[in-house]
Image (spheres, grey):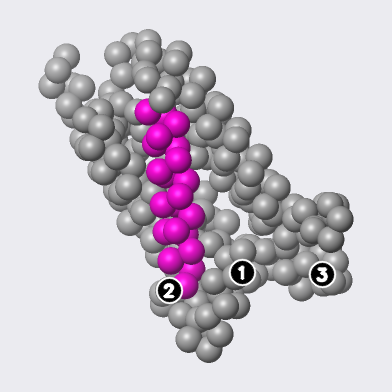
C-alpha cells in the first residue's frame, strides 16, 4: 500500500491522515443531511460531531496507551506520536462526551444519536482504508488459498509477506453497517421511531464484526486471557447493545 500519497514541497501527505480527513468530512455531511431530513437541528449535529470527533480521538489514543503501557513507559513519544488508536476507547469516550453535550444543550441524546450513528460507521470505514494504506492493523499471513496483500518496506506491516487484508474487510463491514442502519432508521422513523434502537443495533453489529475480525489480525494489540483486548470489550458492548435494544422494544410495546 502507499503510506505517502504525494509531497507538497518538503511536506509528505500521508494516506492515513487523508482517509481520516475524508471520513470526517463525509460523516459530517451525511449526518447533517440526514438530520435535516429527520426534522432535527443540523447545528446540533455539527456540535455533536465536533465533540464526538475530538473526544473520540482522545479516547482512542488513551486506550491505546493503556494497551501499550509497557512501550509507553520505555518511550512515550513512540506511542503518543504513532498512528495507533483503539476504536473502542474512541467510541466509549466519544459517546460519554456526546451525552454531556446533549445534557448541556437540553436535547434528546437518543433522538439525535439514532440519526448520526451511521455517520460514525462511515468515518470508521474511511479510517480503516487509512489503516490499509499505512499498513497498521494488519492481518495474519495469508494462506495459499487466501487473498493477501503484500506491503512495502516503509509500511507499518511486515514487508514482503502476503497478509490477510483485515483493514479492507473491516472497512467493507463498517460501510455495510452504515447502509443497514440508515435503511432501518428511515423505516422506523416513518413508523414511529423507537429512540435508541439504531444505537443499539450499531453496538450489536459492530461488536460481532469486531470480535470476528480480531481472529485474523496479526499485529500485537494486547490481550485478556485468550481474547484480544478488543474481543474482550466486544463482549460487553454486545451485551449493552442487546440490553438497550430490548429495553427500547419493551417501551414501544407498552406504548402501543
Give, as a single range, the part of the protein colored magenta.
44-65
Residue, disc 3:
154
Tell me the distance, in whole angstroms, between the alpha carbons under discs 3 and 1. Answer: 14 Å
In the image, what residue occupies the spot 48% across and 20% down?
34
* Residue sitting farthest toward the left: 254
Residue 80, picture quadrant: bottom right
Q: Earlier in the sequence, mark 2 or mark 3?
A: 2
Q: Earlier in the sequence, mark 3 or mark 1?
A: 1
Task: Describe residue 30's horizontal placement relative to residue 93 as left or right.
Answer: right
Secondary structure state at the residue bearing disc 3: loop
Tell me the distance, in whole angstroms, between the alpha carbons under discs 1 and 2. Answer: 14 Å
Residue, disc 1:
82
In the image, what residue occupies the spot 40% across and 34% down?
47
Secondary structure state at the residue bearing disc 2: helix
Residue 154 in sight from this viewpoint: yes
In the image, what residue occupies the spot 39% across and 36% down?
48
Task: Describe residue 138's horizontal placement relative to residue 198 as left or right.
Answer: right
Give the percent coordinates (x, y) of residue 142. 76, 64
Residue, disc 2:
66
Chief secondary structure of the magenta span?
helix
Amino acid at each position: 500500500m502507499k503510506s505517502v500519497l504525494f509531497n507538497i514541497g518538503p511536506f509528505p501527505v500521508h494516506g492515513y491522515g487523508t482517509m481520516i480527513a475524508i471520513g470526517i468530512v463525509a460523516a459530517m455531511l451525511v449526518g447533517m443531511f440526514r438530520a435535516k431530513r429527520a426534522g432535527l437541528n443540523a447545528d446540533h449535529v455539527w456540535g455533536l460531531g465536533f465533540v464526538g470527533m475530538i473526544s473520540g480521538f482522545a479516547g482512542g489514543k488513551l486506550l491505546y496507551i493503556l494497551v501499550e503501557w509497557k512501550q509507553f513507559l520505555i518511550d512515550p513519544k513512540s506511542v503518543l506520536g504513532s498512528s495507533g488508536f483503539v476504536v473502542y476507547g474512541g467510541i466509549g469516550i466519544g459517546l460519554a462526551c456526546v451525552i454531556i453535550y446533549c445534557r448541556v444543550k437540553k436535547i434528546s441524546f437518543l433522538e439525535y444519536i439514532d440519526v448520526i450513528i451511521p455517520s460514525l460507521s462511515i468515518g470508521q470505514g474511511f479510517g480503516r482504508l487509512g489503516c490499509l494504506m499505512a499498513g497498521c492493523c494488519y492481518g495474519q499471513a495469508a494462506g495459499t488459498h487466501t487473498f493477501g496483500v503484500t506491503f512495502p518496506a516503509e509500511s507499518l506491516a511486515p514487508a514482503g509477506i502476503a497478509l490477510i487484508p483485515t483493514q479492507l474487510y473491516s472497512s467493507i463491514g463498517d460501510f455495510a453497517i452504515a447502509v443497514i442502519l440508515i435503511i432501518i432508521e428511515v423505516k422506523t422513523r416513518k413508523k414511529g421511531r423507537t429512540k435508541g434502537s439504531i444505537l443499539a443495533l450499531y453496538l450489536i453489529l459492530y461488536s460481532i464484526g469486531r470480535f470476528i475480525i480480531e481472529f485474523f489480525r496479526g499485529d500485537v494489540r494486547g490481550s485478556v486471557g485468550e481474547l484480544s483486548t478488543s474481543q474482550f470489550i466486544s463482549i460487553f458492548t454486545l451485551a449493552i447493545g442487546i440490553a438497550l435494544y430490548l429495553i427500547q422494544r419493551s417501551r414501544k410495546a407498552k406504548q402501543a
